[in-house]
Image: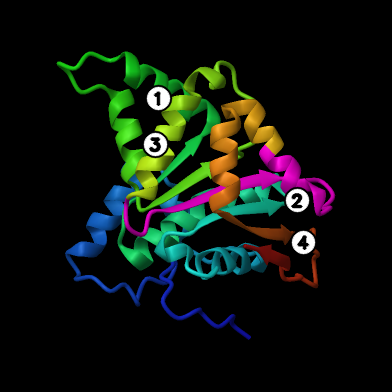
Amino acid sequence: MAKEKKKGLVYPWDDSAFAGTKEDKPVVYDELRALKYNVDSYKEAPKDPQLLDAVEMILQHEGVLNGQWLMVYGNSLTHLKALADLVPITYMLSARHFTFNVTNESLTFNVVQAYRASDWEWTAAQEFVNKATKATLLVWEDITQKTMHSTKASGRVLDMLKRRMSRPQASLLMTVHYRRWKEELKEMTFVEIEKVFGANVANLLEEKSKSLVLEFEPMEEESLRPVRMYGRNA
């Protein structure tokens, strides 16, 4: 039996519910490709139903479409990487708002370069920071990943987050990989973020973020199990 599609979400393999005009749709796809999302690889639904379950959990998680900051924990790097691609694609097709992805490395490099840039010319680094600040959905991949010189960027990263807080419906989705789940990992996540970007960034993220813990089962030849959700915290 085909999986029932969740109301309100538009997927690249079935975009018949796209709310815009015929002229709008190709424009959105062009924007997604320009942002380097692998939209053309999703002409068919993912064979692993866990991935689709996780997309729906994230985008329908207590208002993540409306400005929520969400820390997503997952035990599969492969699934987290796929979610970092498919969630913003689905979001942009569904909500028709701008989305953008960053990593610790790309964010550190660009905020530092943007700060050093001349006031007389608009640089690629300034454009990167502008997109990260103004995107309605910002996807921050592997946020605990250690990165060289990230502490030098901590003040600029904090400024970006504060500017996002002042924007209406500015959602933030962060991903964290774990091997074996235990409740203490939530607290340890912010300890690791503090090591990367300092206490002010870690404290703000801890204060603002809710969490969603996903456990992905290995795919079996005959029986594909859905993703399990452990719970959420305020």
Residue assigned mark 3: 160
Q: Secondary structure at mark 1?
A: helix
Alpha carbon separation for disc pair 2 and 3: 29 Å
Residue assigned mark 2: 75
Alpha carbon separation for disc pair 1 and 3: 9 Å
Residue 126 among magenta residues: no
Viewer-proximal residue, 199 or 192? 199
Q: Secondary structure at mark 4?
A: loop
Q: Which residues are magenta?
A: 167-190
Q: Earlier in the sequence, mark 2 or mark 3?
A: 2
Labelled pair 1, 4 in contact (Cβ < 8 Å):
no
The nearer-to-camera label among 3 and 4 is: 3
Alpha carbon separation for disc pair 3 and 4: 39 Å
Q: Secondary structure at mark 3?
A: helix
Sort mark 4 into few (<14), some (14-19) or many (20+) by Cα contacts within 10 Å.
some
Labelled pair 1, 3 in contact (Cβ < 8 Å):
yes
Q: Which quarter of the picture shows residue 130? A: top left
Name which residue lies at 52% across and 51% down: 173
Viewer-proximal residue, 23 or 193? 193
Viewer-proximal residue, 128 or 33? 128
Q: Earlier in the sequence, mark 2 or mark 1?
A: 2
Alpha carbon separation for disc pair 2 and 4: 14 Å
Residue 8 vs 158, above or below: the answer is: below
Question: What residue type is disc 3 on?
Answer: Met
Labelled pair 2, 1 in contact (Cβ < 8 Å):
no
Q: Earlier in the sequence, mark 3 or mark 4?
A: 3
Question: What residue type is disc 1 on?
Answer: Val
Residue 219: which numbered mark, if any?
4
Residue 128 vs 4, above or below: the answer is: above
Quarter in which the C terminus is drawn: bottom right
Residue 111: which numbered mark, if any?
1
Q: Earlier in the sequence, mark 2 or mark 4?
A: 2
